[in-house]
Amino acid sequence: MLSREYFNILEISCPKNMKCYFMAVFSDGDKELVGGALFQYLDFIGHQTFQESGFLYSVRNFFTKWFNKDILILGNNMLTGQNGFYFDTSRITVEEVILLLEEAVQKMQKEIRKTAMVIYKDYQPDFIRYFQGKSHSKYFRFSVQPNMILRLKENWMDSEDYINAFSTKYRSRAQSARKKNIDIEKAELSLRQIHAYRREMNILYQNVAENASFNTFFLAEDHFESMKEYMNEKFRVFGYFSGEKLIGFYTLILNNRDIDTYFLGYDKLLQKEKQLYLNMLLDMVEFGINNRFSRIIFGRTALEIKSTIGAEPTEIFGLIKHRHPLINYFMKNIFPYVSPETDWIQRKPFK
């Protein structure tokens, strides 16, 4: 996620309200590259963050735009996880890296654009100790929805082994969903096909994106095509067809031995009848098992249904600071209001 190929995609096909910058860090002596970081500016002035209608959500949208009209993010707001920087730790210590990152943040604020807020995005709990120094004392540490991860067991040779590992209740549920999809044709899409179905894919994606209660961006129409063009076999797209009509799709990023699930879309009129979303989750797992991956990173949305197919929550945290000192002082009281909260029940599908 910090490759030249992926950075090319961010340059040519990022959301309209996002601007990306890439920072390189060189050693003092030999001027060799020792690390780098990804920064993203998000503008909320013309963006509808909360999608639901009604007076309460109108107020929340107004307050959000007043509270954080723009944000500087150290990290990638389009992915879940720590995808913001990389350093050669044989040349520089983690403690030095953390100080350099804050120096880079201040450089971006002074030379590029000063924003209402700064966010360090998505770190594992064991990384907290590195942010407890003076340079980060004014940041508020927050945690929202966890990252849902499924660890694939070595004794799962195929999808049948995986489904048989479920308890009776969840095995019956998965088998029932499969039967509802029996007349749906599934196929991996090539670059040419992604281009041909670009408009349909965007409509299906918007069906899902606009249904989310909280959204900080919308993908460009050519985004999936750009992903396939630059990442090739590391980016996979699978379509669901009813006759000749595309009714759904999902996308995967192959990241070493991990699979990162990316964006998807479906016909909302057929979603419940055909259980498209649950079938997509099961198909993602089947792909991972068949190709001997270690983990599937499902991200931080639709937590409960992802737990029904075996994904488990991994807590991640971030840091946030507002430019206005008074607002920043009360951040712990303000943040829960503008940040979406999700009540969910973690399911335990395995025997």
Image (tube, rainbow, N blue to C red):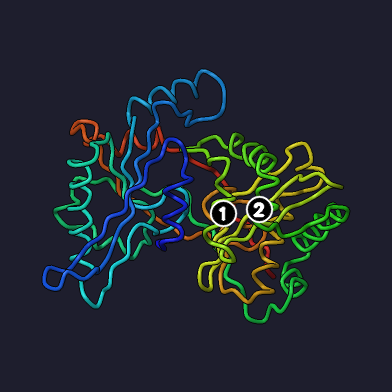
Classify mark 1: helix, strand or loop: strand
Identify which residue is drawn at 55% across, 34% down: 213
Mark 1 or 2, nearer chain start: 2
Percent x, y of residue 48: 48, 28
- Give x and y (percent) for residue 177: 80, 54
The quadrant holding residue 236 is bottom right
Per the image, the residue denoted by label 1 is: 262
Q: Mark 2 sits on what residue? A: 250
Closer to us: 259 or 221: 221
In-front residue for pair 304/296: 296
Whether pointer 1 and pointer 2 mark residues with C-beta atoms closer than 8 Å, the reply is yes
260 sits to left or right of 25: right
Residue found at x 31% / y 42%: 72
Query: Residue 154 is drawn in which quadrant?
Result: bottom right
Q: Position of residue 226 (x, y in %)?
A: 54, 51
On screen, residue 109 versus residue 144, left or right, reads left
The image position of residue 260, as x and y in percent, is 54, 61
